[in-house]
Amino acid sequence: MIIAQRPRINLGLVQAVRKAAFVLAIALGVTLVIFGDAQWADGHFVHEFIEWIGTVLIVLCILGRTWCTIYIGGHKNKKLVTVGPYSICRNPLYLFSILGATGVGAQLGSVVIALAAGFIAWLVFFLVVLKEEEFLISMLGNAYRNYVARVPRFLPKPSLWRDVDTLVVRPNLVLTTFVDACVFLISIPIAEGFDYLHDLGIVPVLIKLP
């Protein structure tokens, strides 16, 4: 009996598409930063409060991605990790990135831009995850199917939490993830700089959103 082999997913292509889509999302975000602004004036309580919430989300993204890497560093797409953050959510790294993207959008002091940035990030990661899931099913079979049936894709389910007593940690990967995630912080001075240029009239404001 001949068993048809399941077609293998080109994960390299998936990751390339993810990066291209993420670059496009960043480009759209940069456009909003340059030419967009909130309806309320800079310095208004609502404007400052939204920026502060955004900063909290960015810090949460940095710490969260670093925390996830402690568990999955070096194992991604090779070994099924189902403990720690991966016991309550299948894609916590992406979830924290979505929070970070929302935080970046919030630096303009606009709820609409913050939610739009988060939605774009979610859409990019959602499309990538669909392909990654095909790949992981082809690699891990029923073990991954059972994991999918039990653990949510993005929205955490805290009641599923379970952990282990010891972990094998790769410090270089943890540090790399931390440094990479810190890039989100660049949005804070950039947004402040363009706010200043908007106030001076050097850069025109073409989009005003609540």
Image (cartoon, rainbow, N blue to C red):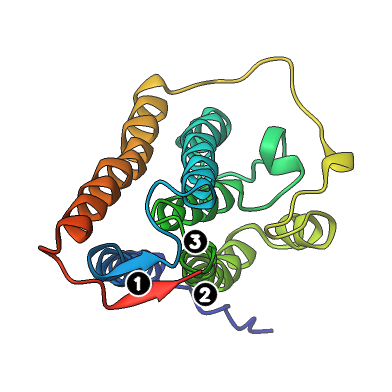
- Going from the N terminus, do you reach mark 3 or mark 1 first? 1
Say which quarter of the image contains residue 23. Answer: bottom left
Query: Is residue 154 toward the left or the right of residue 22 in the image?
Result: right
Front residue of 40 and 194: 40
Residue 116 position in % (x across, y down): 50, 70
Q: Which residue is mark 1?
A: 21
Say which quarter of the image contains residue 35. Answer: bottom left
Residue plotted at (54% across, 51% down): 46
Residue 8 position in % (x across, y down): 48, 73
Say which quarter of the image contains residue 183. Answer: top left
Q: Which residue is mark 2?
A: 127
Q: CA distance from mark 1 to mark 2?
A: 10 Å
Query: Is residue 101 toward the left or the right of residue 143 in the image?
Result: left
Q: Which residue is mark 3?
A: 114
Q: CA distance from mark 2 to mark 3?
A: 20 Å
Residue 117 position in % (x across, y down): 46, 65
Q: Is residue 156 above or below residue 125?
A: above
Query: Is residue 103 toward the left or the right of residue 19 in the image?
Result: right
Are the residues flagged by discs 3 and 1 in contact, CB closer than 8 Å?
no
Are the residues flagged by discs 1 and 2 in contact, CB closer than 8 Å?
yes
- Going from the N terminus, do you reach mark 1 or mark 2 first? 1
For the residues carrying marks 2 and 3, which lies nearer the camera in this image? 3
Residue plotted at (46% across, 49% down): 44
The amino acid at mark 3 is Ala
